Amino acid sequence: MEKLLEVKNLNVTFETHGGTVQAIRDVSFDLHRGETLAVVGESGSGKSVMTKSVMRLLADNGNIKHGEILYHYEDGTIVDIAKLRDGEMHKIRGAEIAMVFQDPMTSLNPTMTIGKQIMEPIMKHQNLSKKDARQKAIELISMVKIDRPTKRMKQYPHEFSGGMRQRIVIAVALACNPNILICDEPTTALDVTIQAQIIDLIKELQQQTKAAVIFITHDLGVVANIADRVAVMYAGKICEIGTSSDVFYTPAHPYTWGLLASKPNTDNLGEKLYSIPGTPPNLLDPPKGDAFALRSNYALELDFEEQPPMFKISDTHYAATWLLHPDAPKVEPPKVVQRRGAKKGVTNNG
Amino acid sequence: MNNMKNDFSKIKIDKSKLKLVSNRIEESEEISGVSLGYWKDSFRRLLHNKIATISLILIGFIFIFSIFITSTTPHSTVIEPQIKDPDTGQMISKKSLTSVPPRIKGLEWLGWFDGRVDKLLPKIALENEVKYPKDTYEIVECEEGNTGKEMCTIDLDVYKQNGIEQLYFTFGTDQLARDNWTRVWAGVRNSLAIGLLAAVFDIVMGVIYGSICGFYGGTKVDNIMMRFIEIYGSIPSIVLLILLLSFMDRGFGALIIALGLTGWIGVARMVRAQYLRYREHDFVLASRTIGASTKRLIFKHIFPNIIGQIVILATFSIPAAIFYEASLSFIGLGLPTDQASLGTLINNGITQRSVSAYLLWIPTIVLSIVMLAINLLANGLRDALDPRLRGR
Amino acid sequence: MLRYVWNRILMIFVTLFLILTINFLLLYLMPGSPFQNPRLTPSQRERIEDKYGLNDPVLVQYGRYMYKVSKLDFGGTIATNTYDDIFEEYIIDRLPLTAKIGGIALIIGTVIGITFGALAAIRRNSWLDNSVTVLGVIGVSIPSFVFAAILQEVFAINLDWLPLFYREANPDIGHSLKDQNLGMIMPIIALSVLPIASIMRYMRTELVEVFSSDYILLAQAKGLSKPAVIFKHAIRNALIPVITIIGPMAINLIAGSLVIERFFNIPGLSNSLVTFTLAKETYATLAINFFYSFMYVTVILIVDILYGVIDPRIRLASNSKLGLIGKLIKSIKRKFQSDNAGGEVNE
């Protein structure tokens, strides 16, 4: 598969009054053309910061300490986004990589017509005349399944519902046929029924445009529905990454176990739901070893002292836990997780 | 990623430590800090703000000073025909005490508080050695003026000229021989008192009116009361002030009533808005569902949430009242001229500007410091009580 | 948009009508109104009572007052024997002067305030931002007459660049129009300090808040350059709340002009208001009060129209097919609602 994006050893910090927050710590992953990578984790785990780094949209006090974000152009040239000048970055944003944000109620400019907001990236990146850009914008509005597109062009965001606004944001993102579409919790702020529609729309449009999607969410149900691969983030690090079925059926990291066990589904029907004890660590002063060790029921002594490396489980599946060391004691994952593993292959997803 | 291999020989670890340990969750729970109460936390935040802390100390200092200073100074504010010399017991006539510039013992070298003034006068006048004894001045320069007369600028030691070298007037005296030091502090005291009383008036009136509106929010009562505020608020408050003052006798009481009648609208609107906001909040709805009484709702749930906002508005309304007082007194509609306030002092200073500039600048600087300090404290309070509004 | 403007104008007529009514009530009810003035001789009092029909029923008097006002007849001065027509003698040529000085100060304040507030927000934590913050606090804390005194000291007394006092152009005594205009510079600067400082502070805060909003992130994610993001997306949205404080600013300017006109000897409305109030000339005071309110509501009208131009939500909300009266009620209601929202950001 053709590589689109390579993130290598990314470190992102934020300067705050309290000190330096290490929001992203040594994150590496690849993204391939046409695939959907879901990034899951609880709030504050760094998933949003990671995608904003890829777009170079970090707040003023945030900066990429070291690491590379390599973007592969279609013609084969490779650029490091982390070191790109602003002018060149403007050519990538919107044209090569586009983004959909969490809250559709606030992500459209309230004083600009919908039409103008969609036309903006088209005119910026595609050198079209105003008339052609207008035509393209109307097509985009009907592509995201909003009726009477010509009339909608002249309307303002406050005349739209939340679901419709998110469709418009998606239209804006897809305006220049980007190769990568980053969706930062695009359904969190929406009603459940609308959520499903938006996810279906994203899936459908992805098939049409062949864009790669990075889908950030904390909702595992959504992940199962949309993702080809899943990266689990905790305390600014990726602790497990693999295909959907790797992570859902044969998870290896205790944190992933906890996440899966705490989600209600048909496997743990009638049982008391598991909840991960404690709170995520303070990233002003991240713990020395495995950040999850304190909250884990499977912590090894080494976890408190040494950062576990990424252990390879299969060609597609990696996890960062000392439990995967050949000399580590063999532990049994929680029953719910074991049951899921047993069901692998029987059904497609949980 | 795919090129990554599990090369265990490269990972050097203490294999003995690869053993399970019991859950240490308690340690992570300990990390979370001690929770502080709202007021304690706010106060801590306020003290963190250096500028606000300095302002608070400065205001406290000025406040205490203005109360005590008027009773400790030797020269009273009332116009006395003459005062007694503290050393010799001789009477000094009022004439030699008028418009004496500031002089402070030990600070003469500064050049500001040395009891000397620059004076421009015709050279002929200097020949009058009774009025201008030779040893009381130095000639700075002489040149021919517009009228063809030779004009001289002299650096005059007023204390020596008036024969009162044993006296020290910290802020000088005015054209009626009143001690400016005493009058400035009395003025600060009056200005602060007006500011505080007007703020109290604003709060009481605003909270009562706003609470009624907020409590009946959305009903006819609220609508009528808000419409009244709307019309009332469309008359510029300074005009209303002047109208009221034109019907009342000038003085302290009239000024406070007039200020109070115009300043409460902002408080009332804010209180009403907060009521309506908190009425819909989940915690209020929750306590309502478990049967909390209306009184309890207002005093236990809604009020504590808006008290911070009220404190902020009140702090801001003090400098506003002082500003109005100074402006009104300045144009002659505030306090009568014999009552000192910063406004009347500045008004007087303007008329004496060419002769005794210090009569203008000292109260002006004091007023500026007071206004700046209270405003900075109010800003600090707002940041401390309502972190969302930081920097506004 | 036209309907929206029409709506606002109608609101202003209602407000002015109510102010006139309050004026009348003050005249009628207040103790110490001109008819109890002890300086009046019995014959003068009789003449006044005859002239104003003080023995008629209230409603007749009210009607007559309104009718006279509609013909710009606000009565005359009482203490002088000449019975000067207030409007002819005092208002018609003093109003423009006060409005001119205040208006220029407001425009300068708005333009400079918005510019520097925006620059401070764009270059956050720079030396420019820090000086804007410091100057902003000083500007809102220190009364305008302090600045007036400093300006006079520096530019008139020490440097002798500008005249100490305002002088009306009068060729007979050698005062040219240039002198008159020079004389207006210091009053305008002194008056504009407060609007500059307040608007600057407000603009900075609002723009900083807008910069942290999602739609700015989206605009950046579209690949727009920084200037494009700032000018096409941020400024306009930050201006909406900033415009709301121009109304209160107008009130502050009126308060400031009372002092400033005294300070610089400007023969404006504010100066006469003080004189008339001290002389207990109630008719004149009320007439000037009315024209103050008139100037104030004019500013509010301009602000409301600007508001409608900038914010489509307000413009479009008034385009429903309601009747005139229905819309009036609706706009009053909306004003109350915006009060509720405004209560959270008391400045």
Image (cartoon, rainbow, N blue to C red):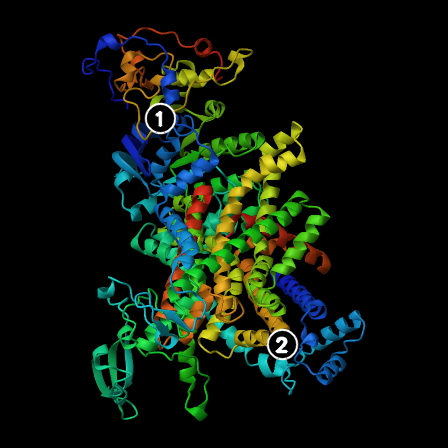
In front of the other: C4 or A314: C4
Q: Could one spot residue C319 in this view of the protein?
A: no
Q: Determine which of the numbered discs, if any, sits on residue B48 in the image.
A: none
Secondary structure under the numbered disc 2 in the rendered image: loop
Residue A11 position in % (x across, y down): 28, 32
Is residue B238 visible to us here?
A: yes
Chain of the residue on which disc 1 is drawn: A
Residue type, numbered disc 2: Glu
Question: Which corner quadrant of the image does residue B22 belong to?
Answer: top left
Number of numbered discs: 2
User: Which residue was labeled with disc 1?
Assistant: A235
**Amino acid type of the residue that numbered disc 1 sits on in the rendered structure:** Ala
Quadrant of the image containing the N terminus of chain B: top left
Please, is residue C213 above or below residue A26 in the view?
below
Secondary element under disc 1, as helix, strand or loop, is loop
Rendered view: A264 above or below B107: above
Q: Residue furthest front?
A: B89
Image quadrant assignment for residue A41: top left
Measure how far apart labels 2 and 1 are at the Cα level: 75 Å
Instruction: Please provide percent x and percent y for residue C124.
Output: 34, 50
Residue C251 place in picture, x, y as percent: 53, 64
Q: Residue furthest right?
A: C57
Determine which residue is flagged by label 2.
Answer: C281
Q: Residue at x 36, y 51 (%)?
A: C226
Residue at 28% of width from left, 63% of height from top? Answer: B104
